[in-house]
Amino acid sequence: MRFHIITLFPNMFESYLGDSILKRAQDAKKVSFFFYNPRDESRDKWKRVDDRPYGGGPGMVMTVDPIIRAVDKAKKKITRYKKTKVKTILFSPGGTLFSNETARAVTTKKYTDIVLICGRYEGIDARVEKILKAEPVSIGNYVLTGGELPAMVIIDAISRHIEGVLGNTASPEENRVSSHEIYTRPETYTHKKKKFKVPEVLLSGDHKKIDAWKLDPKNTLAKGKK
Ligand code: ADE
C-alpha cells in the first residue's frame, strides 16, 4: 500500500515511520510513503499557504490552490502504477471517527493508494473537500494542532492489517483470543514488599481454561468497548 501524505511538515514523520515495524514494512516493500508539501506548490510570491477566514474568526485557514496542486502531484505519481484504487482522506476534528473496522476495511477493499491531507492552523478551506470528494476523518473527540499525528495514527492502524507487516508470529490481536491483561516473566514481581503474581490459569498449560479466562469480560478487549 502506498501512502501519499500532503503536509507542510514532512520531517514530523521521519522518526515514527523510520523505526520499528513500519521501517521493516517499508524495507519489505509492504508499504511506502511519499510526501508532497503544499508550500512547494504555492504560487504566492512569499510562498504563503494560508489566509484570513472570510466572515471573521480566529487564526488562519489553509488556502485551496497549494493543496489541490500537491494532490495533483500525488495523483500524477499514482497514474504511473497499474490497477490502482485510491482513497482520499482529509483530517478534521469534525470528521467521521476512525475505528479499527475502518482500518481493516481499507485493506479488504483493496485500496492501493491512500492520499492523506494534513491541515494546520484553523483548518483547510472547505472547497478542498468538495473538489477532491475527500472523506473527512477524525481520530478522536479532541482538537490537535494539525493532521500529522492523525495521519501517523491511521497509517499505523491500517498497516498492521496488511499481510506480512506484523511478521509470521504475530497477527492483529483482534483476530485471536486475546485479553487486555497479558503477562511475561517473572511469575512473581515484588514491588515495595507486595507480591504481584501472574494469574494461576495462565501457567496451567490448559488451553481451554486459558481461552475461557481470556474471553471473560473481566479480562478481554470487550471490557474496553463497554
Ligand atoms: N485535526 C485536529 N484535530 C484532529 C482530530 N482529532 N482528528 C483528526 N484531525 C484533526
Image: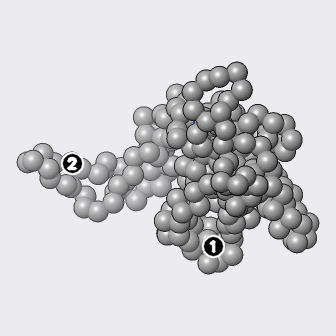
Residue found at x 8% / y 48%: 193
Return the residue at label 1: 26
Q: Position of residue 67 (x, y in %)?
A: 75, 50
Between 12 and 215, the one nearer to me in the picture: 12
**Amino acid under disc 2:** Phe
Q: Is residue 215 left or right of residue 106?
A: left
Q: How is the image coloured?
A: one colour
Q: Residue furthest front?
A: 45
Q: Is residue 150 positioned above or below 205 on the image? A: above
Q: Secondary structure at mark 1?
A: helix
> Residue most toward the left?
193
Q: Is residue 217 above or below residue 206?
A: above
Q: Residue at x 49, y 35 (%)?
A: 224
State left or right for residue 35 relative to residue 210: right
The residue carrying pointer 2 sits among few (fewer than 14), some (14 to 19) or many (20 or more) residues within 10 Å by Cα, namely few
The furthest residue to the bottom = 27
Residue 203 percent location from the top left of the image: 34, 57
Distance between the alpha carbons at the discs numbered 1 and 2: 40 Å
Mark carried by residue 196: 2
* Rendered residue at 63%/73% (across/down): 26
Q: Which tag, 1 or 2, sits closer to the chain's start?
A: 1
Q: For this view, does 113 lie left or right of residue 13?
A: right
| Amino acid type of the residue that numbered disc 1 sits on in the rendered structure | Gln
Secondary structure under badge 2? Answer: strand
